[in-house]
Image (cartoon, rainbow, N blue to C red):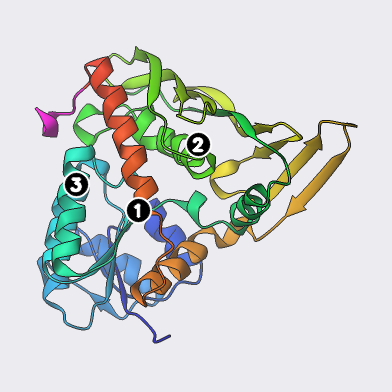
Amino acid sequence: MREYKWVSIGCGAIANELAKSGVKLYGVANRSYDKALAFANKYDIEKVYKNIDDVYKDRDVDIIYISTPNNTHISFIRDAISAGKHVLCEKSITLNSKELEEAVELAKKNNVVLAEAMTIYHMPLYKELKRRIDNNEFGKLNLIQMNFGSFKEYDMNNRFFNKNLAGGAMLDIGVYALSFVRYFMSSKPDQILSQVKLAPSGVDEMASILLKNREEEMACVILSIHSKQPKRATISFDKAYIEVYEYPRANEAIITYTDDGHKEVIKEGLTSMALEYEVRDMEMAVNGDDNMHLDYTIDVMDMMTSIREDWGMKYPNEE
């Protein structure tokens, strides 16, 4: 497989993680040229673009990594795909299903790969668990329980609570929980109930979500951005239940067997390599071996969009 040239649009926290992870970036662009220049100097990046549009014009660029605020994703995706560039975009990939549908159609038209940077789909631990589940080692899947809660400063102007920046629990952390649910469920949930507590800014501060699919598999998701919870997932089967902590980038799971209560610990991969696994799978997809799970991304976005519609919660970009 040939070496692909990556450019990051954005140089915030996630872009820094990507650069630190060992992924070799060819270039970087940002709304602030000075910040892009400092980022390039820090990580020995060859090319710094004065204007983001210059990235799209550069014929040497193969893949663009978008790590800007959620509300800006669709505009960068449109421009990148229209220029014939493959796109790996940070979660949440778009604000809603309508935007994602447009992006998917555009990617098909331009024959490029579009994917969401969702770590859960690429961690070796989950690939191994999925293999064993598909081999029916644990029996029928019955229930998934998800928790994810952070304690962010109660400042309505920061990105977590700012409606203009598409803040709120759903798009920031709920996407992880629902991606986990979709990855392990046999099909997309078709029955969803939820309740929400809105922050003063109008974004979702806390939410509880119940889901069920046609196979009668159920899930319960509890989210909060101003009340700390463990990042904990439990998957319950007839023959065992599986517990995973720090599940967005987990490398360990504990299996407890129903018949005698004995435990098995599984370790696969490294948490520190989470972004490298994403990049590796993305390059394989560009090379023709697609394992990016865009179908799951579409299902999760459909769920998030439907839930927010039930809440009557819209972002300014959606008005």
Q: Residue at x 45, y 39 (%)?
A: 187
The residue where tag 3 is placed is 101
Q: Residue at x 51, y 57 (%)?
A: 122
Amino acid at circle 1: Leu
Taking depth in this image into account, of 106 and 89 the one nearest to the observer is 106
| Residues drawn in magenta | 314-319
Please indicate, yes or no, whether residue 49 appears anywhere in the rendered image. yes
Secondary structure under badge 1?
Answer: helix
The residue where tag 1 is placed is 294
Say if the magenta span includes residue 13: no
Amino acid at circle 2: Val
| Image side of residue 129 versus residue 292, left or right | right
Q: Residue at x 82, y 31 (%)?
A: 258
Residue 181 image label: 2
Please report whichever mark, 3 or 1, sits nearer to the chain's N-terminal start. Answer: 3
Q: CA distance from mark 1 to mark 2?
A: 15 Å
Q: CA distance from mark 3 to mark 2?
A: 21 Å
**Residue 135 drawn at (x, y percent):** 67, 52
Q: Is residue 252 above or below residue 112?
A: above
Write down the quadrant of residue 171 in the picture. Answer: top left
Secondary structure under badge 3?
Answer: helix
Q: Residue at x 29, y 35 (%)?
A: 302
Amino acid at circle 3: Glu
Could you tell me which quadrant the N terminus lies in? bottom left
**Residue 308 drawn at (x, y percent):** 28, 23
